[in-house]
Image: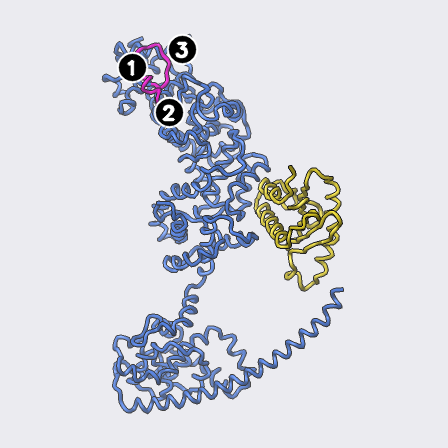
Amino acid sequence: MEQGPGAATGGSFISLSENEQRCYSGLYTLCQADSSGKLASSKVGELFRASQLPAEILHQITEVCGAKRLGYFGTGQFYVALKLLAAAQSGLPVRLESITGDLPLPIFAGVKSEAEMRFPNHSSQASDGQTHPLSTNAGPVLRAGTMTATDRPAFRPPENSMEKQEPWSPPRSPCTSPPQSPSTYCRYGYSAQRNGTEPLVGYEGKYPARPAMLQENSSPSHYSHKPAPEQPAITRALSTERLTDGATDDYSDDPWRITEEQRDYYTNQFRTLQPDLGGLILGTVAKNFFTKSKLPIPELSHIWELSDADRDGALTFPEFCTAFHLIVARKNGYPLPEKLPPSLRPSLLACGEVTVDSPKIIQPLIVFEDSTPRAIQQEKGMVEIQQASPLPALTTSTPDVRDDARKSELSPKRAVVTVVTQEKPVQHILPVSAANLKPDPPNELDPNMKSRTRPRSYSSTSIDDAMKKVEEPPTPPPRPQKSHSRASSLDLNKLFQQGSQGVKSGWLPPPPALPPRPPATQIPHFLPAADKPSQKAVQQPNFADFSRFREEEEAGVHPASQSPLRRAAGPSTEDLGPPKPEPSVGIQGHAPQKPVRRKYRPDSQNLEATPPATAPYPPAPAATATVTVTTSKPAQRLAPKQKREIQMAIRKNKETNAVLTRLNSELQQQLKVVHQERVTLESQLELLRPLTST
Amino acid sequence: MAVCIAVIAKENYPLYIRSVPSQNELKFHYTVHTSLDVVEEKISAVGKAMADQRELYLGLLYPTEDYKVYGYVTNSKVKFVIVVDSSNTSLRDNEIRSMFRKLHNSFTDVMCNPFYNPGDPIQSKAFDGMVSGMMVQVS
């Protein structure tokens, strides 16, 4: 038995030392070799697992020793495998070359063997918290008692696929890992008996593996699309799962904790339903998805109740993970909890961050180029929500519309990030949220995240308009006197952009007709031009206060502000009538500063007369005189001409005032008339109402 | 603390009805059924133009010597009926309103569950728990 087994493996000779021979033969007998020299796969599996190597390594060992190829462990394969185990435990790579040298004996945890040399190993390992499958089959961990009985029905015998997995204990069969196997769901329906030999060796960390064990061979129903291509991924995932299982003891105690692979799996599943990890899965979509798990509807309903924490009828990514995890647990026989387990509750939010972090880290670079700034925003929003989480800003948020309190937090961000926020997710979120009648925001965390969408939805549309509206009314107070403040310049810029040279012509026709017209006709003019008055109002202040600030500007005109000045001067020059480059320039300097008087109607400007066409000046009404402004760049001389112009401007202002007053009175009269009509109509309505109601 | 709580669908069949078990449940079923007449009368009295302004809380529907019946209608014509013991005089109108509000919220949660088909009997545990909290505790 010494050299033979070595020779059996691909012809490579492996020399075994005396110790090794003794040890291996002991192990060999332990594994209950049958007559043909094949070893009981279950025992071998137990042994391998007892070596406490990660699953990946164990897979490799199986492959290298040839057992995978053969489909069973012969003596040769077994011995080579043992040596490989030793090599792996020594930190060497799993290669045939590494076992040619001298190696210590492989260490198995909890292996009962008569060999003395194992005792030291055993004792050292015995203290490990790891499972001791060989010693106590019933041991494995946690709810093993209930689990074993219930898990078995949940498994299916892995006959078909993966015979090569035979040497491995079924729980470890890398055929599918729960996180990755979409077909696990298909299998759920089949709950056939699985190899009972290896009940749940391992801790609940493995219980997700159990569904994984279900072979996807004959799964007709595609729970998710491609089972075949996922197999390699599944194998990989399973091995990583083994890794996790081996590595993490704390997970062993909590069946409700989501392992890494599970989270990855959930993430992938989430992506199939909703590509945006920060988005929502609608209720109907989720319903169809989870119905495939073949759980009874009341149970699914209960799972939904547990997982939809914000009760909005849609699942965010953490909620989806919770629901999925509960379904997996239920499939494995865990009774559904009445309340959400703590590990699934707030930690989910952290989970969501963790899992999403890495993909998001990559994405932000991409996101900017792509038209998905929403992810970034969501991440940023998530950051503020997850105050407790130390993770960086890259986390997805759950855009539910809930709290208004958070709107303000997000709106500056939104304004900063981008105007191009996702319209679609917002739009579909809005209908979802609109469907809810929740008056009270249930959770503190989720509502925060939800509130994010609200500012997003509101402000996503035309931030420019919002900016305009916002800026125009409030700007007056803060604006400084001296130079044009940003706000003022913005206004001017806007005004400038809005109109162009021809604007003036467009504006003119209505205005000139206004003064003589009766009030009634004027109203329709004003009402439709809702935004225009604002623009005009902006212009008007310039126009109106031009005279006042004239002196000021003479004092402090800056050449730098000429272009805005120019524009500002536009309306102001209107007052002057004769275009005056210098005064206009001066005026420009102050006109922008003069915030205020928006109330002036366009009429006033219209009344003003005609304007010389100031080409650059957009705001039409004002535009009149602005034409002259163009020429007026530099000249800032304060000549007596300016005084004259100022006086003319004053006169015109007074005329404008008079006209506006008249207009005002006319409008008041109209308002009274309308009021009376309304009263009569209401009285008629009341008279009629009793007749209809009875 | 209510003695009986019922949720009636728009078509006037019960979606959920639960009463204090020690007493004759049939009596409560009958009471709730008759209260539907009063509910219908109240909601029809508002008038065509006031549908959106109709108050959801209907108030005391009718008192009997043993108990009082309060009603509440949602905008989708789902009715909540609460029967309280007449001897329980400490219950104020505000408390009844808050009970209805909680009922409405829980009902909305049930509705949001995609696995719940409107018109099905309500089997939500959360809803049950909430209702239990509002019922008279029978030792």
Q: What separation in Å lies between label 1 and label 3 (alpha carbons)?
A: 22 Å
Chain identity for the colour blue used in the image: A
Evaluate whether residue A631 shows in this view.
no
Say which residue label 1 marks. A11
Indicate the position of residue B95 as horizontal and vertical percent values. 62, 52
Tell which tag, 1 or 2, sits nearer the viewer: 2
Q: Give the range drawn in magenta.
A: A108-129
Displayed quadrant of residue A502: bottom left
Chain identity for the colour yellow used in the image: B
Q: Check disc 1 and report its element: helix, strand or loop.
A: loop
Q: Which amino acid does label 2 sit on?
A: Gly
Q: Is residue A693 left or right of residue A467?
A: right
Mark 3 touches mark 2? (CB < 8 Å): no
- What sort of colour scheme is used for the picture? by chain
Q: Where A88 falls versus B6 (above or below)?
A: above
Q: Chain letter for mark 1, please.
A: A
Tell which tag, 1 or 3, sits nearer the viewer: 3
Q: Which mark is residue A129?
A: 2
Closer to the chain start, of discs 1 and 3, is 1
Tell which tag, 3 or 2, sits nearer the viewer: 2
